[in-house]
Image (tube, grey):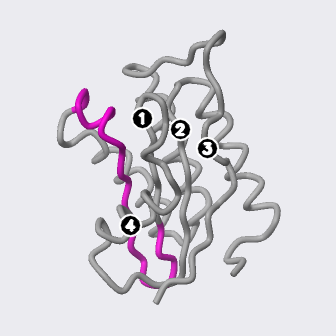
Amino acid sequence: MALFTDEEQQRIREAIADAEKHTSGELRVCIEKTCSEEVLERAAKYFFQLDMQKTKLRNGVLIYVAVVDRKFAIIGDAGINQVVDTHFWDSTKEDMLEHFKTGDIVEGIVTGLKIAGDQLGKFFPYDLNNDANELSDDVAFMDGD
């Protein structure tokens, strides 16, 4: 289910790679057409389905977007939630939403990835000698129901 062109997918992959140059955190993007449940529950389901909880420092972040239903969520793993305040993702979501409102989903995602990488770098800095890409940078397209 390709909701984005190859070029748009490549742009997202590059944004993930660029963001991960600022942090040891791992970022993923999950896309589907519709979301048949509460958006945070859906995002959490895919977070575990994509094995994001298996990073060494438990510092994975998932940006989930249901394109047709116009829903999205950002969730972080336990390691992140232990060190950030409860409103950590609010400004990131607002910046993404500005792009989503104009119909530019890809730009909203890219913006969210950049901000997430910068913010995570404060708590989980990139370690040139000891950092590995633990998760795929490919966009995960789900079927939705």
Q: CA distance from mark 2 to mark 4?
A: 17 Å
Q: Are marks 3 and 2 in contact (CB under 8 Å)?
A: yes
Q: Is residue 32 left or right of residue 128?
A: left
According to the picture, the residue beneath numbered tag 4 turns out to be 45
**What are the residue bounds of the magenta stretch?**
65-84
Q: Residue at x 51, y 69 (%)?
A: 102
Can you identify the residue that label 1 sits on? 59
C-alpha gap between disc 2 and disc 1: 6 Å
Q: Looking at numbered disc 1 in the image, what kind of residue is underneath it?
A: Asn
From the viewer's side, name the closer residue of 113 and 131. 131
Under mark 4, the amino acid is Lys
Percent position of residue 141, x then y: 62, 71
The residue at the point 35 percent across, 61 percent down is 44
Q: Residue furthest top?
A: 129
Q: What residue sits right under mark 2 in the picture?
A: 26
Q: Secondary structure under badge 3?
A: loop
Q: Is residue 134 above or below residue 75?
A: above
